[in-house]
Image (tube, coloured by chain):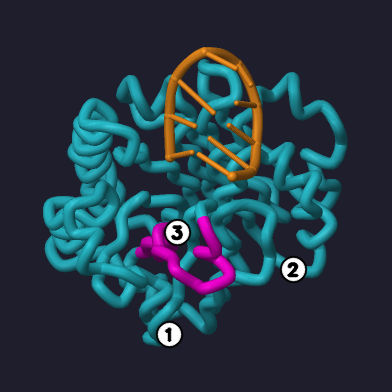
Amino acid sequence: MRIMTFNANGIRAAARKGFFDWLPEANVDVVCVQETKAQIDQLSDPVFHPEQYSCHYFDAVKKGYAGTAIYSRQKPGKVLSGLGFEVADTEGRYIQADFGDLSVASLYLPSGSSGEEKQTRKVEFMKQFMKHMKKLKDSGRELIVCGDWNICHKEIDIKNWKPNQKNSGFLPEERQWLDELYDNVGYVDAFREVNSEEHQYSWWSNRGQARANNVGWRLDYHVVTPATAAKVISAEIYREQSFSDHAPVILEYKI
DNA sequence: CGTAATACG
C-alpha cells in the first residue's frame, strides 16, 4: 500500500500546477491532503474527484482557509471528520478514513508563525490532539496519521536549526511534544524507519531561492503505530514536484 | 511572497 501526504496550499492552485495530472504516476492507494483552501461547492469540477478514488473533503467554515481531504482507491468503511473540539472541527483540520483494522488520517496542525495568539492556539490544539492520539493508541487499531504537523522534530529535519530555535515550528516545547508522542505515547516517525539521510525537507519558504537551494524544513509526516512502522518499505519526498510550497511525501507499506 | 479573499502562512 502506497500512501501520500501532501499540503496543497490551495487544491485549486495545485490542480492548475498539474497535481492531478501527476497523481496516476504517483501510483498511490491513499492521498492525504491538507490546506485545500476551498469549500466543496467550489470543487464541482471532476478534476477534484479523480475517478479511481473515493474522495472525502472536510472544509473549514471560513472561505479559502485550511481544510483537509482523503482520497482512497478502496472505499472507506467509515469516514470521521473533526475531533470534537472547536479549532479542529470548524477549521477542517482532521479527517480519518477507516479500512478494516487500519485507520488513515489527514491532519493539518495549526501554524503559529504569524503571531503569539496563533501560537497559543497551536499549543492548545497540540494539547487536545495528544489526548486523541492516546485514545487511538489504546483502541489497538493500526494507525497512520499523515499530515502537515507544522513542527520540525530534530536538527536533521531543518536546514538552519540554530537561528530557528526561537521560531514557531522549531521551538523546544514543540519538539518535546513530538518526543512525548514518540517516546512515551509510542508512535513512530515512519519516514525515519527507512530514511536517515540529511536534507530531507518537505517545506520551503517562498522567499528567495529557498527551494532551489534546499533550505527547508521537514514538517509533513506519517506518524504510525509500531506494528505499522515495521511494515514500511520505502519513504520518499518528491522535492522536484512543485505543485505547492510543500512536496508530496510517499511511503510504501507492506499492507 | 503565494493563495485566496482583505487574512494567513
The span shown in magenta is: A208-224
Can residue A93 be seen here?
Answer: yes
Q: Would you place residue A188 above or below residue B5 in this image?
A: below
Q: Nearer the viewer, mark 2 or mark 3?
A: 3
Q: Is A157 or A114 nearer to us in this picture?
A: A114
Q: Quadrant of residue A118?
A: top left
CA gap, disc 2 to disc 3? 19 Å
Q: Is A8 or A23 nearer to us in this picture?
A: A8
Relative to A36, is A213 on the left or the right? left
Mark 2: secondary structure:
loop
Q: Residue at x 42, y 74 (%)?
A: A191
Q: Nearer the viewer, mark 3 or mark 1?
A: 3
CA gap, disc 3 to disc 1? 16 Å
Q: Residue A56 at what x, y percent from top left? A: 64, 37
Query: Which chain does the cyan colour mark?
Result: A
Can residue A103 be seen here?
Answer: no
Chain letter of the residue carrying label 1: A
Relative to A14, is A95 on the left or the right? left
Magenta stretch encompasses residue A190: no
Q: Residue at x 51, y 53 (%)?
A: A207
Magenta stretch encompasses residue A216: yes
